[in-house]
């Protein structure tokens, strides 16, 4: 699974640094090309010679040493990485990552890389539960950084609690699973819609909804990480474009309809996560409507139902829809699933805490036409996206590719 993969292993200065030796050894045995980057503090706990011997590659310890890769070291390391694993990730390093500090080789590489990043926190349980550390982890999670652990047990200081770094075997298994997931949609073409469309009333005002686009963007990123070629048809948002994803910006429901239909025939999967306006003003004003003090009546006409149209004309495509409801969630979602002819429907009650528009988290159920249902607890939207990718992969014919 890891043959040919280039993994950067960052080792920060904590007592758990000694476990980095076993992590490196396991990754090498699994076929990975491992490059180790150590902080100065880490070298106080374990020698670079140990990790160089186990990895078979030079160990990088400082910004100002002679470059071993022939150019600016932290950029070269950042660009060659298929995955960056930081183990142990101390409270200090997590704070640097969250703030974007780059005062040594490891933090500079982390700021420069576009590769996926996985961290294995390791610290005293009080440090782990400190509001600053929890806030830093929340920021990193929002940015797409994955976390392994921590585990619970007796710590080096003699205290007991969570904060221990996960065991090397568990960390290596997560890395293996990461690359296994990256093959789930290999060679597939996926179209994702995201954001809330905007329907003009006049040149200044428009009708829209509360969608932030976070769920759709997380899905686009997860599909790309799973190996798919991804087109993201996006209504206006303030979100950064996921790396490797092609974005088609649209504003109105009609523009989204045309963009999705234009790419539908070539798609293997279409995921309609956007919140599309059901109606638009019949005749938007050419000039700004002035306030007169009298009542204002707008005539609204229906927009095309993009999901229903895709359900009518699909041939081989896997079609995924979303149902954001405020009452009778399952009843409305199941009715929508049948009416729109989707292969999987993601349902959520936006009135539940943590599941509404703009939140970093979601609480969803996956519904299938055969009657199956999978309910999930509160998860980050990135986690929901990865669960969705796994379900889509299972629905695709001949999913596994050599």
Image (spheres, rainbow, N blue to C red):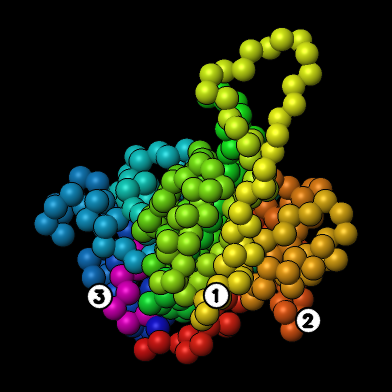
Q: Are marks 3 and 2 in contact (CB under 8 Å)?
A: no
Q: Which quarter of the rendered picture does the N terminus lie within? A: bottom left
Q: Residue at x 64, y 64 (%)?
A: 308
Identify the residue position indicated by label 3 in the image. Answer: 56
Task: Tell me the crowding category of disc 2: few under 14, some 14 to 19, or many 20 or more residues within 10 angstroms, Cα based.
Answer: few
- Decide if residue 291 is in sight here: yes
Q: Is residue 190 left or right of residue 75?
A: right
Residue with the most extreme left position:
70
- The part of the image, by quadrant, that contains residue 102 is top left
User: Which of 299/190 is in front?
Assistant: 299
Instruction: Say few, some or many: other residues with alpha carbon within 10 Å of mark 3 (under 14 / 14 to 19 / 20 or more).
Output: some
**Which region of the structure is painted magenta?**
2-12
Q: Secondary structure at mark 3?
A: loop
Q: Residue at x 31, y 70 (%)?
A: 6
Q: Is tag 1's residue or tag 3's residue first in the polypeptide sequence?
A: 3
Residue that mark 1 sits on: 314
What's the CA distance linking mark 1 and mark 3?
A: 51 Å
Taking the spot 59% from the left edge, 59% from the top edge, the residue there is 306
**Looking at the picture, does residue 308 appear above or below residue 400?**
above
The CA distance from mark 1 to mark 2 is 21 Å
Q: Quadrant of residue 24?
A: bottom left
């Amino acid at each position: 699974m890891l043959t040919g993969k280039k993994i950067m292993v960052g080792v920060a200065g904590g007592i758990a640094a000694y476990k980095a030796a076993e992590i490196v050894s396991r990754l090498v045995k699994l076929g990975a090309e491992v490059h180790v980057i150590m902080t100065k503090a880490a070298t106080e706990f374990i020698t670079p010679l140990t990790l160089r011997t186990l990895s078979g590659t030079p160990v990088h310890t400082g910004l100002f040493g002679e470059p071993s890769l022939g150019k600016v070291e932290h950029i070269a390391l950042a660009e060659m990485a298929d995955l960056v694993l930081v183990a142990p990730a101390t409270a200090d390093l997590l704070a640097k990552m969250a703030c974007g500090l780059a005062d040594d080789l490891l933090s500079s590489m982390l700021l420069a890389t576009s590769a996926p990043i996985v961290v294995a926190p390791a610290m005293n349980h009080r440090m782990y539960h400190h509001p600053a550390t929890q806030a830093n982890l929340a920021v990193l999670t929002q940015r797409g950084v994955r976390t392994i652990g921590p585990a619970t047990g007796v710590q080096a200081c003699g205290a007991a609690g969570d904060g221990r770094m996960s065991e090397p075997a568990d960390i290596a298994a997560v890395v293996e699973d990461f690359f296994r997931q990256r093959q789930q949609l290999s060679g597939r073409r996926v179209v994702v819609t995201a954001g809330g469309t905007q329907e003009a009333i006049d040149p200044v005002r428009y009708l829209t909804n509360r969608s932030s686009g976070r769920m759709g963007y997380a899905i686009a990123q997860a599909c790309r990480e799973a190996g798919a070629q991804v087109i993201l048809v996006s209504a206006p948002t303030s979100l950064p474009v996921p790396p490797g994803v092609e974005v088609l910006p649209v504003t109105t429901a009609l523009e989204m309809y045309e963009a999705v239909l234009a790419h539908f025939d070539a798609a293997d999967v279409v995921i309609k996560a956007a919140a599309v306006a059901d109606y638009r003003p019949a005749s938007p004003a050419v000039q700004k409507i002035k306030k007169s003090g009298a009542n204002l009546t707008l005539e609204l006409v229906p927009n095309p139902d993009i999901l229903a149209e895709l359900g009518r004309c699909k041939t081989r495509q896997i079609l995924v829809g979303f149902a954001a409801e405020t009452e009778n969630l399952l009843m409305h979602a199941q009715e929508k699933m049948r009416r729109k002819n989707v292969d999987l429907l993601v349902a959520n009650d936006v009135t539940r805490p943590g599941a509404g528009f703009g939140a970093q988290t979601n609480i969803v159920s996956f519904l299938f036409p055969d009657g199956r249902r999978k309910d999930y607890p509160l998860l980050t939207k990135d986690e929901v996206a990865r669960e969705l990718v796994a379900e889509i992969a299972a629905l695709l014919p001949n999913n596994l590719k050599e």
